[in-house]
Amino acid sequence: MSDYTNYPALLVATPVACWLAHKLIWSKPNPVGRLPGPGDGHWFWGHELAIFESSHEEAYSRWMDSYGTTYKIKGALFHPDIIVTGDQGYAVEKAPTIRSFAERLIGRGLVWAEGSGHKRQRQQLSPFFTTQAIRDTFNTINACAHKGTDNLEEHLNESAGNSKQGLALNITEWTSSITLDVIGRFAFNYDFDSGRSPAAQVLKHLWHESEKAGLHWTALLGQVAARAFPFMSYLLFPFLESQVMVKRKLHEIAQSIIDGDVKEGKEKDMLTTMVKLTSRGEITSTREELFDHMSTMVVAGQETTSGSLGFTLYLLAKNPKYQTRLREEILQLGREPTYDDLTSGMPWLDAIMKESFRQRPLVSHMERIATEDGVIKLENPAQAEDGTIITEVAMKAGQVVYIPTIAMHHIKSVWGDDADEFKPERWFEPEMAERVTKNLGWNDDPG
């Protein structure tokens, strides 16, 4: 693995280049200047280091409480002010650097695609996510879950006898193994053996290294430097190296499956099905694109699902009364829950999962860029420093926009004064769905 001492020239050259770009390119008046916002940004990092080092919820929510749902923050490395907003209704797309990083980390899949390419890929993948398709995979998901919990129970029983002071358990390692099993079966009918297979061990190690590197301040430097100079996104920063190796490993697995004898049979995994459809001319997809679909599915699907499941278990551990209610609901069934039970017959399970997703959405914020000159019509007007009410904001093409998903999920005007509390019963309120749809137009889908 690379270390951070390999980049001294980059660390010196990047801020100098960004300062010159600021003077030569970005020094024109910025039309977002009238927006309110925190004025204590660092001369070099702006407000972006504060976001990086703290909980995104804490930083964005603090500013949202002070300035409303639309405000500006100072960009790092002399970048123009960034709009932070939850309002919608204008043309934005993924920032070029986001797409460049996505291409390197998981390939040209759905997270990378835009426009007509994104539409085509969604059409290719949508048959795998219909209600019937998900219902058809229920037994596979159930089997993976049972295998994982059986292994966990075995581990607890073996460890309990060797522990005199209690047993500490990192539950995320177990949720990661279970979700990797599910995604492996769904994506390409591959058995990761509940996280025990050699391939699973390699992937889990690389993910761990990637997470560590992503917490280092050079990860932020790499991101903002690439935003200023997109060619830098093709440098092998330490925070990218492990994830690039994950992509290669997943491509190796997909390659071995495709190189095998893919026969017309009952296999319904995504890769095998898409290979058959491609060979019959029913869809148009290159081998590399198939590999990228698998990388996207495993990386984006496994990590988000595992994280959400782990966080839900954490919330239940902190709030035992809801854990008790969920146990009672399960016991009242008197049998193994069916697909229909899980989707419509267990209201407390549904409410708990929704509340967990509200507390920690799949992505804490999304970075987008304006595709054309335009105007943001603010559903929730902002107030300038001189007291003027701002109902619209002129925006130039190329303007960077942050959508603070996690902060939007904690707005007291939408969720009530108890917005920061874990309170699943709020989802039993009849008007909740309408209120959420009206006030939270952005969805959490990073693709």
Image (spheres, rainbow, N blue to C red):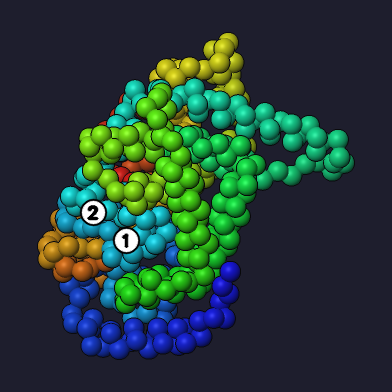
At x 74%, y 44%, the residue is 168
Dot label at residue 320: none
Q: CA distance from mark 1 to mark 2?
A: 9 Å
Residue 362 at x, y percent in the picture: 42, 47
Please say if 67 is above or below 203: below
At x 48%, y 34%, the residue is 189
Q: Residues within 10 Å of mark 2 (few under 14, many from 20)?
A: some
Q: Which residue is mark 1?
A: 99
User: How many discs appear?
Assistant: 2
Residue most extreme to the top = 334
Drawn side of residue 98 relative to residue 151, left or right: left
Q: Is residue 164 visible?
A: yes
Please say if 274 is above or below 210: above
Given residues 38 and 150, the one toward you in this image is: 150
Residue 130 at x, y percent in the picture: 31, 28
Contact? badges 1 and 2 (CB < 8 Å): yes
Q: Is residue 83 visible?
A: no
Q: Quadrant of residue 210?
A: bottom right
Residue 297 at x, y percent in the picture: 41, 44
Q: Which quadrant holds the N terminus?
A: bottom right
Q: Residues within 10 Å of mark 1 (few under 14, many from 20)?
A: some
Given residues 225 and 384, the one toward you in this image is: 225
Residue 428 at x, y percent in the picture: 40, 26
Q: Amino acid at mark 2?
A: Glu
At x 58%, y 61%, the residue is 209
Given residues 95 and 147, the one toward you in this image is: 147
Given residues 402 and 385, the one toward you in this image is: 402
Drawn side of residue 402 relative to residue 410, left or right: left
Q: Which residue is mark 2?
A: 114
Q: Amino acid at mark 1?
A: Arg
